[in-house]
Structure formats: C-alpha cells, structure tokens
Amino acid sequence: MAAAAGATAAGVRTVRVTVALKPGVLDAQGQAIQKGLDALGHAGVRAVRAGRYFEIEMQDTPDLEARVRAMCDGFLANPLIEDFRYEVL
Amino acid sequence: MTIGIVVFPGSNCDADTYHAVRDVLGCEAVYVWHQETALDGLDAVVLPGGFAYGDYLRAGAIAATSPVMRAVRRYAAAGRPVLGICNGFQVLVETRLLPGALLLNRPGEFRCEHVRIRVERADTPFTCALREGDILRLPIAHGEGRYYVDAETLAALTRDRQIAFRYCDAAGHTTESANPNGALDNIAGVATVSGTVLGLMPHPERASEAIVGSADGLRIFESLARWIAGRGVVPAPAGAGAGGGAAPAGRAEGR
C-alpha cells in the first residue's frame, strides 16, 4: 500500500469525504451512540453526531475538486439534510 | 389495464404488491427490472417496499440512479400515475420526484406495527375512491420513515395540498402518540401538486385482504383502478367533501 502523501499511483488522487447531518436536523443515530457510550461508562460525553466517511480514489484532473463537489452535492450528501467536507490527499 | 411494479436489487415487497394487484384487485401486473428504460403499455407504476441496494448510502439513494428511474421521471412528467410504497417513497424523494427526506425514526428504532392514517386529500389517482377524513389501518415496517422538510417547504406543501396522509389515532386525531417515527406534522404520505405521484410509508399491499388483518389498503389500489378506468379523470370525492370537485386530468406539473 503506497504511503506517500498525495498519489497512490501515477495520476490517481485519494479524496476523503465526510458527510454529516446539518446542525438543525435531529440525529437519532448519534443519540443512540451516545447512549451506548454512556452504558459503557464513558463519562462526560455531551453530544454525538454520526456521519459518513468515504475514501475515493480518482483520476487526477485539473477540475478534480469540481468533480468531487459534483459527486457530493446531491448523491454522497443529500443537500436538504446534510453538509459535506472533502480533503484531497 | 396493466400496472408495473419496479424491482430493484433488494426490493422485497414486489411479490406482495403483485399479489394485491393481480390476485386481489384483478388487474394485470408486470415486474419491471430496474435496468428497463421503457414503461410502454403501463397504466401505472408502483415502486414497492424493501431495501433497495441494502439502503446503502441513504435509503433509496442508489436506486434513484437506476436507469428505470429516468424512465419513471419521464412517465411522471407526462402525468402518468406513480405510487411509491415505503422504500419506494424513499426512492421518489431521492429522485426528487417528491419533496423532502425520510430520516431515521425518532426513537431510533425500526417500527413494525399497525398504524392508522387519515386521508388528507381525495383527489389523487390513489385516493379517489376514498374521502377526506377516512381512516385506513395499515402496517408499517421501517427504520427510516421520519418525513422531514424545512419550514418554508412545509408551508408550501400545506398550501398546495401535497400532504396526502397523516398518522392519526382511532378517532382521526393527528396526535404525537399516533406518530410512529417522529415525522413532521404526522406526515405519512406526500404527493405532487397534481397528485399523480404519491409516496407513503405504510404498506397498502400488506393490508389488502381481511385474512391478514386489514383490507383498508386495497382501497388505495381500487382508487387507482377506478382512476385508470376513468381515463385519468378524477371524480368528485364520494359523499359530502369540503371543496369537492373534479380536478382536470393530465396536469403534468409536479414539485
């Protein structure tokens, strides 16, 4: 497994995407996870928000970020209820 | 009269829907594989319940990218009737044929039980044999049925009569305890402005024969058969109804 930052192979970039519910949306999964942490004895947990994480290996092009945003906005993230962040490694 | 039932990988209520349509209602029914791109000869399309693509990413999200959904979009734009049941409703919102999103149930649990829903709108292909205020007892079986839209959209849905069904108690009151999943405003089903595309979380195909505990769901399929037979004319609601009157057929606007 290539460990060099950036390219995993010539002309290929890895993009990390995280998708999270928008702040105003009730997060039932996060609440359930918080209950689990509480049951396991982890003190002091004020809140948990649960999201999704994707790693995408894609061909490197000058418009890479625009392509990533197009994948995120409407498919990887539902814009009605979710925000997304991405990081190109 | 032929009703098409779309099958995605992971759909599991297609056979029950087929049975309700063909064996109980007595209409021709055909399965439509998700790779199909033509819906010729179908008088209505049903997106059944299940776990299309395992609910991966978001329920209905990947199914919304299937080739058949491009055809369903054209079909709906032409004013033809499309019914989404449970996962089918989720596919319709992910396809943006219906507004909103269906989120994880508020208690965070899968709810599998009978509920009651109140008919909020009788002038759609799926409710034209019913009256506003009618109560249907149907089973639900879902983990992500909490209907959500922002406040502005909720106001528009209310104004445009797009809320088709609400969860209610036996007396028809839309109480919090009658709401199984925390859905906004007890919304159980939503339609386009014209009413020809409708999605609901409860399962009418699982309540189409008395032997399974309720035949209330058959009335939705009977409405559809009546609407098709009437060649798309929505009759005035049966009995006295507030604001009754035939809606013009074939209005293709959707939201």
Image (cartoon, rainbow, N blue to C red):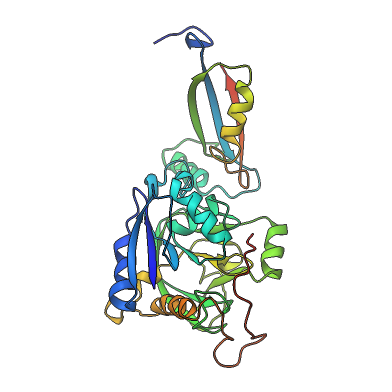
Residue A17 visible in the displayed image: yes
Q: Is residue A73 above or below residue A24?
A: above
Q: Is residue A72 above or below residue B199?
A: above
The picture quadrant where one finds residue B216 is bottom left
In this orientation, which residue lies closer to the viewer: B46 or A52? B46
**Residue at the image point whose x is 58% and y is 41% from the top:** A74
What x and y, as percent, mark residue A16? 53, 24
In this orientation, which residue lies closer to the viewer: B62 or A27? B62
Left or right, B126 with respect to B215, comes to: right
In this orientation, which residue lies closer to the viewer: A87 or B110? A87
**Residue at the image point whose x is 42% and y is 79% from the top:** B222
Left or right, B39 with respect to B148, comes to: left
What x and y, as percent, mark residue B80? 52, 66
What x and y, as percent, mark residue A63? 63, 21
Q: Is residue B96 above or below residue B179?
A: above
What x and y, as percent, mark residue B254? 63, 61
Q: Is residue A11 above or below residue B22?
A: above
Q: Residue furthest front?
A: B40
**Residue at the image point whose x is 54% and y is 81% from the top:** B172
Residue B188 visible in the displayed image: no
